Amino acid sequence: MSFIPYGKQNINQQDIDAVVSVLQSDFLTQGPVINHFENRVAEYCGAKHGVAANSATSALHLACLALGLGEGDILWTSPNTFVASANVALLCGAKVDFVDIETDSYNLSVTALEQKLLEAKSAGKLPKIVMPVHFAGQSCDMVEIAHLAKEYGFHVIEDASHAIGADYSDGKVGNCRYSDITVFSFHPVKIVTTAEGGLATTNQAELAEKMQLLRSHGVTRDVNLMNKDSEGDWYYQQIDLGLNYRMTEMQAALGLSQMDRLDQFVERRHAIAKVYLERLAELNIQLPIQKEGRRSALHLFPLQLKNEQQRRQVFDLLRQAGLGVNVHYIPVHTQPYYQNLGFQPLDFPNAENYYARAISIPLHHSMSDEDVETVIQKLQECLT
Ligand SMILES: *Cc1c(COP(=O)(O)O)cnc(C)c1O
């Protein structure tokens, strides 16, 4: 019996040809394709600038650095995310805290955010950055978050690792109308892939330039940025402390080719989700909901079972049946590393309650209709 993973890349001949043609060209890294890819994604989203990196984690790190996050600063994010969202703040020397999630969308709760901001203000501990995570591909309430950002004076980085191709209000996620920077992931389980890779969009030229500089050692060949005249064609200056977070030309070529099919990928995910929503409705489990004014990219299809015990049972049965079900996410603050920083179990009860009952079932472009049928049948067998 074949194994159906919860997420998987879809690679066609055009993708393969694009990568091979780069391999036969003059540049494997720092060539022309990276710019094309950055422009393509920025244009798709309706943002002014795109800065690619070797992972979304790197892009999130660059975003925090570009916004000046450092020692003495605080970043808030959702506990219902991959550890990277929080880790990047610690890597900058800042502190991390979390804002609990809503029980319907499983996204960071604006009500909880507002409450926490009020308390933080009187304690003099306001965050420098808030990082909403568009869980499963559905945008957070960005209008409200942007409103609070203005009122309390924090920056916003959208962790849109799940959400390339998603819509919010009258635009694409990534247009940065309600944030400083948005970051996408191109890991193979996400919507489009570059194997490893990520990209930050922004409308602020200074932020884009800063991320470009820090992505490549803090080194520049632009004489306008140097503190004296160039000494010759070989000359460069290090003007900041940076890293090597560059994406290769092969990755950019793969991403550029994949962008041709992004809308198709999201369409197919919606078609599968529609079948799931219709056929699983009778099973007495909580299905994911779509909030008004947004269209998810549907990176994940998270179910909520009755309780932890039923989740364990159903998870094991589905795995035995060859379904690559998974659980997203173990709340970040319950990880040993974060417990050692002083976070307690039960600090963010909605995220923990959600986690205890969660299963992500397979949803991706490479699934056939028969695969979808198999998932439905196995779930019916477990739950009736
Ligand atoms: C996948 C993911 C990341 C990290 O992406 P990489 O490209 O693997 O570094 C960060 N945040 C969220 C929410 C993710 O799902």
Image (cartoon, grey):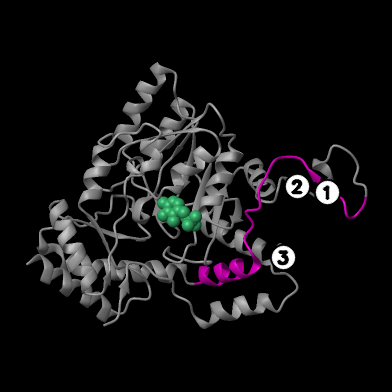
Say what amino acid the circle numbered 3 marks: Gly
Q: Which residues are magenta?
A: 232-260
Residue behind label 3 places its C-beta within 8 angstroms of ligand 1: no
The amino acid type of the residue labelled 1 equals Tyr
Quadrant into which the N terminus falls: bottom left
Compare residues 44 and 152 and report the one nearer the observer: 152
- Depth check, mark 3 against mark 1: the one in front is 1
- Seen in the picture, residue 289 relative to 367 is either above or below; the reply is above
Q: Is residue 140 left or right of residue 311?
A: right
Inspect the image, locate mark 2, and give the three-letter code of the amino acid beneath it. Val
Q: Secondary structure at mark 3?
A: loop
Label 2 neighbourhood size at 10 Å, few (<14), some (14-19), many (20+)? some
Name the residue that disc number 1 marks.
Answer: 236
Q: Secondary structure at mark 2?
A: strand
Give the class, few, some or many, for how many residues have Cα within 10 Å of label 1's Cα (few <14, many ≥20): some
Image disc number at residue 219: 2
Q: Evaluate if marks 2 and 3 touch, with contact meaning CB atoms under 8 Å apart.
A: no
Mark nearest the camera among 2 and 3 is: 2
Instruction: Give the mark nearest the N terminus, 2 or 1.
Output: 2
Does the CB distance between marks 2 and 1 fall below 8 Å? Answer: yes
